Image: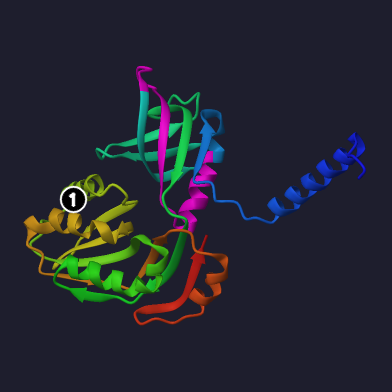
Amino acid sequence: MRRLNLFDLAIIVLIVASLISFSTKYIEKEPVDEYTYTGSQIYSAIRFFDFSDGKGFRYLVNVDGSYTSDYAPFKEQGVVVGTSSQGTFSMKLKDGRLLTVGGRTAYKEDIASKEIKVTMLNGSAVHYTQKGFSTNDLVKAKSTIQNTSKFLDKYNIIDTTISGNIAVDGNFPKGIAFEKELSDKITKDIFYLKDVKVISTDNGIVLNVSGLGANDFEILQSALSSYSPTGYYFSDFKTVVLTDNIPKDDISQIENNKFEGIIGDIHVRI
């Protein structure tokens, strides 16, 4: 039997390397769930925030930098609640504080950032419009919303967020001062809530919410309880179901289905 020489070994190494390259080329990689930007890359970070918000994704941001007022170090985690084309974004901390964040050389904003780390909390988002309904209890409303999204249970639903108007009957004070006080309280109490506006009406208030999670309905009900609400009226509202990764092969099946309580089309974002 002929013994292997260096030329034979070289051929074997090339063949093995080619096979490895071919196989890994067509293996789908696990999605990256963390992204890091320097303070000098603030515009890239903001584009990523806008892109992720448009898809309905939920994420946390960790900002490492300093206060512009006294240069004291700043290192906190929060959620992005607004962006600006001027290279800044608004960040809500877990204690409810709202801060503006700029790049490395920021001086007008609250924080100058050295590093921004983004952690994604869901892998896919399913969008649809849900038909409005009325109820006398927000826990029942939560159940209605979650029952509508049950067709996505096998993908592990993390939360279901809604955006739209909720009319609330009750003994609410009137006036701009009260509207701001209540909106500030709700914003502080509900960490992942993107935005809320309180509008006084003859019968109570209207809450215009953006990104209100069904998991936080009990917190909202507690914030309103002192005003003795008697009824909640949901107009047709935009819904985003946050899930783990949905396989590409399942998208058409999900989008082509019709479900009770859903108006129009279903759209999957991955």
Q: Give the left or right position of residue 28, taking residue 239 as reference.
A: right
Asked if residue 63 lies in the magenta stretch, the reply is: yes
Q: Which residues are magenta?
A: 45-73
Residue at the image position 24 percent from the left and 56 percent from the top:
216
Residue ID for mark 1:
182
The residue drawn where x is 29% and y is 73% is 147
Please indicate, yes or no, whether residue 174 appears anywhere in the rendered image.
Answer: no
Residue 154: name its quadrant.
Answer: bottom left
In depth, the one of 46 and 171 nearer the eye is 46
Residue 52 image position (x, y, % from top left): 49, 52
- Image quarter of the N terminus: top right
- Which corner quadrant of the image does residue 166 belong to? bottom left
Residue at the spot x=35%, y=17% of the render?
A: 70
Q: Quadrant of residue 28?
A: bottom right
Q: Residues within 10 Å of mark 1 (few under 14, many from 20)?
A: some
Q: Is residue 1 above or below residue 227?
A: above
Q: Residue at x 16, y 53 (%)?
A: 175
Spot occupied by residue 172 in the image (x, y as percentages of width and height): 10, 59
Name the kind of residue labelled 1 in the image.
Leu
Residue 259, visible in the rendered structure: yes
Q: Secondary structure at mark 1?
A: helix
Report x, y in % for residue 157: 36, 62
Give the image location of residue 210, x and y in percent. 34, 57
Camera-nearest residue between 16 and 202: 16
